[in-house]
Amino acid sequence: MKKRASFVIAVLLFSGCGSSSVEPAGNPPVPAEPAFVNNPRIVYSDGLHSENTEMLRLGDRILLVFRGGEEGQTGSARARIMIFESRDDGRSFVPLSEVSMPNDPDDPDDDRDIRDPKLVRMGDRLLLFCISRKPGFSYRDLFGEAWLVRAESADGGRTWTDPVRSFQDIGPFGTEVFWGFWRFTRRTYRADGQTRETLYATAYNDGDIAVGLFASEDGVHWRKHATIISNYHDVPSEAELNFFGDNSEKAVSLVRLDNQGILEDGQTVVCTSREPFLRWTCNRRFEQRFDGPSWIVDQSGGRTRHFVFARKHLPCTYKRTAAYELRGDLTDAGAPIQVCEIQELPSSGDTAYTAFAPLGGDRYLLSWYSSPVDLEPAWLEGQFSPSDIWLADLDLSLAPDTCTAPEPEAPCRPPPLPVGAGPLAASGRFLTTLSPVIWPAQSLFFLAEATLKGPQFDLSLQPLEPEGKQPVGDPWVKRGLAMAADGSFTVDFGTRTLPSEAYPVLDSPIPLNLKKFKLEARTTSADSFCGSVTGFAEVLPSRSDRIHLDGSTFGAVPILGSTLPDSVGACP
């Protein structure tokens, strides 16, 4: 995987528990006026892919936790949970400990990943909950065999027990159901004249089909309490959870829905329930997909305000971390909800999975992760590239009273085509390089052959494997095409099959079905052309399983002799 040649190291790599304080480095300038989120700074960077932040306040200490040790999101036994400590309200952090899965080096088939850390204090114990899956990059978490794993610390996070599997649910047919636990929320309430506490958790199953509600009295033994939402096409996953009311008798969950494409925007559904939380109503949705969110409920000043920090989705699969406010009565399934966007945070590529820790009053410390902000990679590329851990200061008293609605969703538009150079002068063979909008640097290659036949021409595209440029699969052929006087033409290939060898970045032997695949092209000379692509790749036949290609570009140059160029740029 690609690594940066130079990077900021705000906290040195460590093999044990360090003791020296490290000040954040490489920070952007502080805004002239205080902002809702201010003083953003990188607190950790090591040239690897760090992600999934969590924080917890323990007296005068703040623990910052995240997943590290890997070059990307692909699961492996190298991943570990890194724990840092601050004793000065987040101005500096020192390494404290690490937690890894106890994998057997002599039996790699049993290796497991570890990610998505969550900290819960239970009496004098500190519990670290994580999701553990089998190594590899799984689609919709299918076949990841997600486990809830738990490590415990009796000394405030300095040492930990080895992670152990903490939950196993047997389905009605005796088959094991795998759940990735996401949010842990403590409910304090009165029952039978006594004050009680129950730890609840939201979790999503392999395949991202359902979100369940789980309950535990001790953080060790869990029972499945209810299903919050279940729908294959909605792709529900990460779900926030909070309790409201005089006796915490109302529950609200904000559930991420990846229902508009794998790498696109989607929706968030607001689900509500009342004690005993067995039936849930999920009838309100808004058009922002909150990935890896964290949720602050502020009840100061005589009103309740809901602040959410999550991944923001831009056209062409670019991402940001952003701060939002949800207005309206979230506990009332019939009340309208207004989404307000407050502020974008420094971020790009693969980003978000925020966390917060209180600093006193209206002030909090906020964390997130991000690809290098100056590189602006597409989201998929960012998942396989270095990323850094960021911190910022948050002041709820500076939240705006006005509501700025998020920008409406916009399509990914390709750059304009160049001025045409007239029709192709002769039949020929061309190396065609297609830069997919989802990861422009990972090109698709085709051998294109144009055969002129009077006012019309035939065009074939032969997929090539990227390394040796050898043909894979059958050529795609369209006949009787028309070319305008300026050299512009359109080729509608409809539905085609792309062999997996032509795009090995997906690391899957399953070919991709391309639907509504269309080239819009224009000549740049008498023997070359370029253009853009529309259509989508379909992993499975549903809208939520699509990879949109709109905004992708390509270029084609003639092949002279038997040697193919390495690649071709898109339209100038």
Image (cartoon, rainbow, N blue to C red):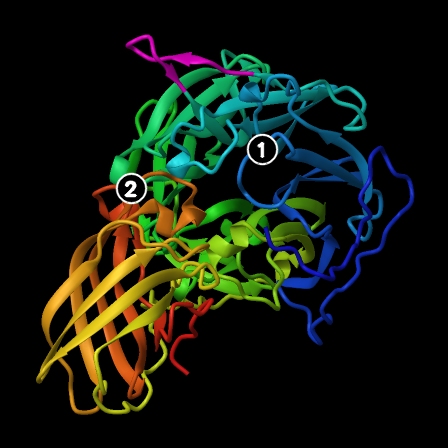
Q: Residue furthest front?
A: 561
Looking at the image, residue 234 sits to the left or right of residue 325; the answer is left
- Residue at the disc numbered 2: 234
Which residue does the numbered mark 1 point to in the structure image? Answer: 76
Residue type beneath disc 1: Ser
Residue 237 x/y as whole percent: 40, 37
Label 2: how many Cα within 10 Å (few below 14, some 14–19, many 20+): many
Q: Amino acid at mark 2?
A: Asp
Inter-mark Cα distance, 2 to 1: 28 Å
Q: Position of residue 506 (x, y in %)?
A: 41, 46
Question: Which quarter of the figure is the C terminus placed in?
Answer: bottom left
Say few, some or many: other residues with alpha carbon within 10 Å of mark 1 (under 14 / 14 to 19 / 20 or more).
many
**Callout 2: SS:** helix
What are the residue bounds of the magenta stretch? 166-177
Residue 89 highlighted magenta (yes or no)? no
The kind of secondary structure element at disc 1 is loop
Q: Is residue 391 left or right of residue 224?
A: right
